[in-house]
Image: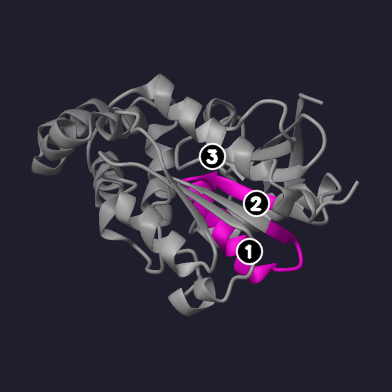
Amino acid sequence: MGASAAIMHGDAGLAVFDSGQGLPVLFQHGLGGDEAQVAQTFPIGKARRITVECRGHGASLLGDIRPFSLRMFAEDVLAAATDRGFERFVAGGISMGAAIALHLAHHYPDRVAALVLVRPAWTFSAAPANLEPVRTVAALLRSYPVAEARERFAGSEIGMRIRANAPDNFASLLGYFDRPNAVAFASVLADIAADGTGVTEAETAALTIPTLVIGNEQDAIHPLACARTLADTIPGASFVEVTSKAADKARHFAEVQDAIATFLASKTIRSLFPS
């Protein structure tokens, strides 16, 4: 398996990627990401992986429903998993994808057997302070022509601070201005960056499934503190700190892939899916 297919869920045509075989894993990209981002992060050949490009991302349509929300994206993803025969699976993702996975784990405990949270940007509150740069990008795109909005962000206090302290984040934020659908996508950025997972600290602490949390330093959008907080809150969660992309991108992806592969190959995870 390796092909993508468009499915209809509600009002949106969503691109769904289904690759590999074996252990069922639903693994989602970050805000503004796509299947290619997941392919960089997820170890090849370690599972049957489904990834849905969320509304407005990759080849998926924006649809007509507003506002966008993590719950909306989670429902889309769950529908795709059901359509592909995933009754129980490992849920995971990067940043926004981690938030979607956490939402699914709490709201659909009969479906999610384990969690993989890579560089989480949300913990228990909506509109976290670390996503203020994303909200700033959205506001500029709604107020100015794209080129001017980009220039204003690059020259702003928040833009210059991130460029100095987290250059990888800065490059990603500038990428929002370069999207072909940048103006329309501003609604996705604004709505999602103002949203929350819909899972409280107490509800997170009540999770009883195997969990891997991965984080790194030098990341303004995905603070290491977010990863540590989730790892400390979920009982028995494993925490792995990896090299930041800003320091060494190749090493970062290699370490993330190794951590995920080790987790998925563990006896604990394998026992959840007897062949």
Which amino acid, by three-letter code, is at mark 2?
Ala
Quadrant occupied by the N terminus: top right
Residue drawn at (37%, 57%), measured in percent from left and top? 228
Amino acid carrying label 3: it is His
> Within 10 Å of the Cα at label 3, are there few (<14), some (14-19), or many (20+) other Cα atoms?
many
Q: Which residues are magenta?
A: 90-113
Real-space CA distance between mark 3 and mark 2, rounded to the nearest whole angstrom: 12 Å
Q: How many marks?
A: 3
Pinpoint residue 7: horizontal percent, then vertical percent: 76, 40
Q: Is residue 106 magenta?
A: yes
State the residue lying farthest toward the bottom: 202
In the rendered view, does 146 fall on the left or right side of 259?
left
Q: Nearer the viewer, mark 3 or mark 1?
A: 1
- In this rendering, would 65 be left or right of 200? right
Q: What residue is pinned by disc 3?
A: 29
Disc number placed over residue 91 in the picture, else none: 2
| SS category of the residue bearing label 2 | strand
Lateral position of residue 154 relative to residue 225, left or right: left
Whether residues under marks 3 and 1 lie with C-beta atoms below 8 angstroms apart, the answer is no
What residue is shown at x 61% (from left), y 56% (from top)?
74
Labels 1 and 2: the sequence-earlier one: 2
Residue at image mark 1: 105
Relative to 39, 183 lies left or right: left
> Which colour scheme appears in the figure?
one colour
88 to 84, vertically: above or below: below
Residue 53 appears anywhere in the view: no
Residue 255 placed where, x, y %?
47, 31
